[in-house]
Image (cartoon, rainbow, N blue to C red):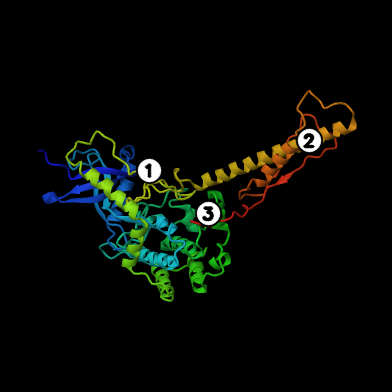
Amino acid sequence: MPEQPKYRRIIELGRGGMAVVTLTAMRSTHGVTKLVVVKELHEHLAADPECRAMFLDEARLAARLNHPNVVQTFEIVDHVGASAADGLEGACAIVMEYLEGQPLNRFRALLKDDPRALAIYLNVLIEALSGIDYAHTLTDYQGAPLKIVHRDISPHNVFVTYAGEVKVLDFGIAKANDASSAPTQSGTVKGKLGYMAPEQARGERVDARADVFACGVMLWEAAVGRRLWAGMNEAAIMYRLTQEQIPAPRDVRPDVPERLDAICRRALAQDPEQRYPSAAALRDDLEAFVATLPEKTSRRALGDIVSSLFAEQRAEVRRVIEAELGRATEDTSSKPLPKLPFAHESSSSVEKTVTGPTGITQATSTTPILSAAPPRSRAGLLLGVVGALLAVATVTTIATVLIVRSNAASTAVSSTSAPAMTAGPSAPQPTDTQAAASVTAQAEPKPSATSTLAPKPTARPASPASAKPTTTVQTKPSANPIDVGY
């Protein structure tokens, strides 16, 4: 019987624009099998030397991290253009720790009615901040600081295991922000806009304080109990993030403790110089605040809570894994990988995850940043704003033309006793005019410079004295109500 390869893919966990993530059985000596997560760069990208080099640079950076609150990277595989017999032939991949648990975004959704919710969430955030600070302060073997910045901190990249451990995921776009590192390509913004610092959204060079801001957004959502930017599109978020002050938690929910409000406001300061200087400083203030709360949460208690909330999903995941591992002697190389029997979940309008609510997650996300589309540049965002303005202008122009025609028809009917005209465009009924006006009133203007739009004259003006009405577009987006839940 031929010896089995070291790696055997058993379940596809997610597929994105850059890579595919699989749950993989890794065989070691003496027949020991261990479950790991493998992220493989797509074949067409692996053939691109630049993409491949970037992927491997990020993999080497992630492999340097070794902390209880950071997901562990075991191995970097680069078999592109070479033969191999380990089961990952031709692959450019990262082999990572398999975690059994739930991402924080799913976990918190089931906690909102629990009186311990705030204490639990803050304890998870404190653990995550320890892992983030470790990455920020990591040095090379000569003692020089690497100045790593995660750049994609969010509840989707904080994982809580069924044992109560907290792990920071997805250092795939992390960067050693030193003089030797190449700057981010001009116009490219990496990360999730909903948790992005203002300077990061503007495409400027960032440091550890950008990750502090992202944690501040998570803290704001924990304190208030709802999403900070829910219900807003990318253009509105970008405008408010860079041009307006973020509301303090107590301005939205007056019962938020004053101390927690002050911590959150400092973490979310527009000016990085006014923020906490490090993740450790924010963690220390949160620990002092949590010590004053009546609810206490240990690691064991946290694990018990996650396990009880997701008991059914955990059992089903184990059943699927055991079934797939039982087919170890079958030749499955020509068959597509099975997927877990749960629908993938969309987290929000600005970001998507690639795993279902099952408890299996990849150690690093494969989903393209800024929603499920390729990264947008600032120029792309501006084009989106311009497109939205043109849409608003079209609606208002049509509505104005309908009103002008309605007035023209009314004038013609009142001045003569002849029946309504049968040639040419007929006057709209009052209900049509009201519907057009309603559409105009509901259209939400996007942030831009004020512009005045004039409709084209109709084919049959009511009278030579009719003046062309104008419509003024607001310079700021109207206030959207924030969703009441997560």
Q: Nearer the viewer, residue 236 or 412?
A: 412
Q: Is residue 142 above or below residue 288?
A: above
In space, the residues marked 1 and 2 are separated at their CA atoms by 52 Å
Q: Position of residue 179 (x, y in %)?
A: 37, 58
Q: Separation of disc 3 and disc 1 at Cα?
A: 24 Å
Residue under label 2 = 406
Q: Which residue is mark 1?
A: 16
Relative to residue 80, is residue 418 depicted above or below?
above
Q: Quadrant of residue 118?
A: bottom left
Q: Residue at x 67, y 42 (%)?
A: 439
**Where does label 3 land, which residue?**
230
What element does badge 2 sit on?
Answer: helix
Image: 468 above or below 215:
above
Residue 413: image x %, image y %?
A: 86, 31
Q: Residue at x 61, y 48 (%)?
A: 446
Whether residue 479 is visible here, answered yes or no, is: yes
Q: Mark 1: few, some, or many residues within 10 Å (few <14, many ≥20)? A: some
